[in-house]
Amino acid sequence: MPSEFEIIQRYFSRPARHALLGVGDDAALLRTDAGAVLAVATDMLLEGRHFAKGAEPRALGHKALAVNLSDMAAMGATPRWATLALALPHANEDWIAAFADGFYALAERFDVDLIGGDTTRGPLTICVAILGEVPAGLALMRSGARPDDDIWVSGELGGAAYALHDAGNAAAASRLHQPEPRVELGEKLRGIAHAAIDVSDGFAQDLGHILERSGVGAVVHYALLPKFPCGDAQLQRRCVLAGGDDYELLFTAPQSARRELEVLSAALRLALTRVGSIRSGEAKLQLLDALGKSMATGRGFDHFA
Amino acid sequence: MPSEFEIIQRYFSRPARHALLGVGDDAALLRTDAGAVLAVATDMLLEGRHFAKGAEPRALGHKALAVNLSDMAAMGATPRWATLALALPHANEDWIAAFADGFYALAERFDVDLIGGDTTRGPLTICVAILGEVPAGLALMRSGARPDDDIWVSGELGGAAYALHDAGNAAAASRLHQPEPRVELGEKLRGIAHAAIDVSDGFAQDLGHILERSGVGAVVHYALLPKFPCGDAQLQRRCVLAGGDDYELLFTAPQSARRELEVLSAALRLALTRVGSIRSGEAKLQLLDALGKSMATGRGFDHFA
């Protein structure tokens, strides 16, 4: 059985390309770009909570990093460095090798360095911290939405949640297990979007965070929401409005940016859909059906509800 | 029962004093000092592995941050910002309030901002990532030890490990549950020490990391090691050499620094003890007893051994 140090040496010591010192000391050392602000976030995934027992390790390595990259995308930050704390029930080398492959494959696509971590024995737990850079003054915060902004969503909503209802649907499974963080979109939205968040807890709840932080309301037309095809209309509504884990970007932008966003959508080959608009007043979401009648928004994900 | 967002709002939203944006968005935003290098580390603590079920929450909050501050100390870095990912089996507000108090009390002593995190339900797990700053070129790495350097240790060794053998010993219990990270010492060692590490896995193993990284050997005199009083000599040897969790600093420095280190020891009111010296050659620790005979070093902690 490999030791803790052998595990790190064999599977988690690829050279850091953009750090002064990577894995192997008490801390990593790095230098940020002059003029850039550092963005920092962390997300923890637990077996039985965020993924099922027996989940495919390569996909898990991907997802653990993807959900953190998505936080960078939602800030308009360019992800640069990550740490990985990993608790493993036993040192199964095949499992670890596949997990590391999934993690590094995504890291290398976005030129992100794994610079440090912690390995311990325990119930399977993955905690990533991510560091990125964003030019000073251009970060996309939840608090920036203004009255008359358009509300936009990337990609489609509901696919990840639908995967839990239709295990045979490969497209839905891929949304759930191999989410694609919208990093390039986040970077391109700098200077265009007023506010942004990633859809991790459900569209209605995540839009609610923007409304609260910005002190504004919103009107959204359910018919306009880009929906993953789910068959049953009622189930689809639940998946689209309250299903989490899609990791699409939800953002607001001035009406004057419509043409620019259409061009961006084409350039990125990524659907960007205008679904409603920001209103002054109470931080409340008014969701309208095709007849203009109010709909219930459902509840998003709360770990302690 | 409070929601995930209420927990964060009530217990983990004290204002960040040194960040552009703290808890509450997709990521925190901060700016590093020009001329400083950023040091980054992470440590995860699990119930049943790093602490016993039913551990006192205030002490846990302290320890989760302390072990990370200790990584900064071992790099000679000044800790500045931390993130906290927390899995809780249930939302017990008394527990959370006490944990947060322990965490913030230590954070405030060192002027460290809690800037973000993640809260989820699961087996009690605490993962902290820490960011600090160190002037360019002055970080204390494991790789800097040179032949003829003195080997020094702060404080006393073995107390934390001894606490597991004598539950009634309050001084030992305090070493285990409320370790004091040697942050000021780490900062003062910039420009003096050649190499440093914190004693988390046991003296012999942690010194071994310096020897491997530096490509040097060492001679250490057991009689010189500063020892927590443990009663039994054999148990004491095990606790001092192979017991982890002391979080003292182990460092090497040129002989010319002896006077300076004695003055520093007095200024910090912290024992600094010279225990041996670095030798050229194979990365091996030669441990000598009072008669100059070789002693076994024992095994340090390995989570997968």
Image (cartoon, coloured by chain):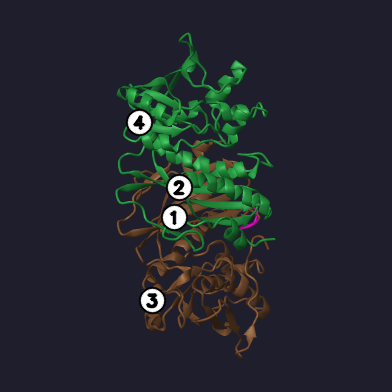
Chain colours: A brown, B green
Q: Which tag, 4 or 1, sits closer to the chain's start?
A: 1
Q: Which residue is mark 2?
A: B111
The disc placed on residue B148 is: none
Q: Nearer the viewer, mark 3 or mark 1?
A: 1
Asked whether the residues under marks 4 and 1 belong to the same chain, the reply is yes
Q: Amino acid at mark 1?
A: Arg
Dot 3 falls on which chain?
A
Question: Mark 3: few, some, or many residues within 10 Å (few <14, many ≥20)?
Answer: some
Question: Sequence-wise, which precedes: disc 2 or disc 1?
Answer: 1
Query: What is the quadrant of residue A290 in the picture?
Result: bottom right
Q: Is residue A227 above or below residue A86?
A: below
Q: Main secondary structure of the magenta part?
A: loop
Chain of residue at mark 2: B
Residue B218 seen: yes
Which residue is depicted at the point 65% across and 71% down? Answer: A299
Judging by the rendered image, the residue that carries numbered circle 4 is: B193
Provide the residue span drawn in magenta.
A49-53
Judging depth in this view, the residue of A223 and B46 nearest the camera is B46
Dot 3 amino acid type = Leu
Do labels 2 and 1 touch, CB within 8 Å?
yes
Tell me which residue sits at (69%, 42%) in the image.
B54
Sequence-wise first label, 4 or 2 = 2
**Mark 1 crowdedness (10 Å alpha carbons): few <14, some 14-19, many ≥20:** some
Q: CA distance from mark 2 to mark 1?
A: 8 Å
Q: Residue B215 appears at what percent x and percent y?
A: 36, 28
Picture disc at residue A264: 3
Q: Quadrant of residue A163?
A: bottom right
**Which residue is the site of mark 1?**
B17
Q: Secondary structure at mark 1?
A: loop
Closest to the camera, between mark 4 and mark 1, is 1
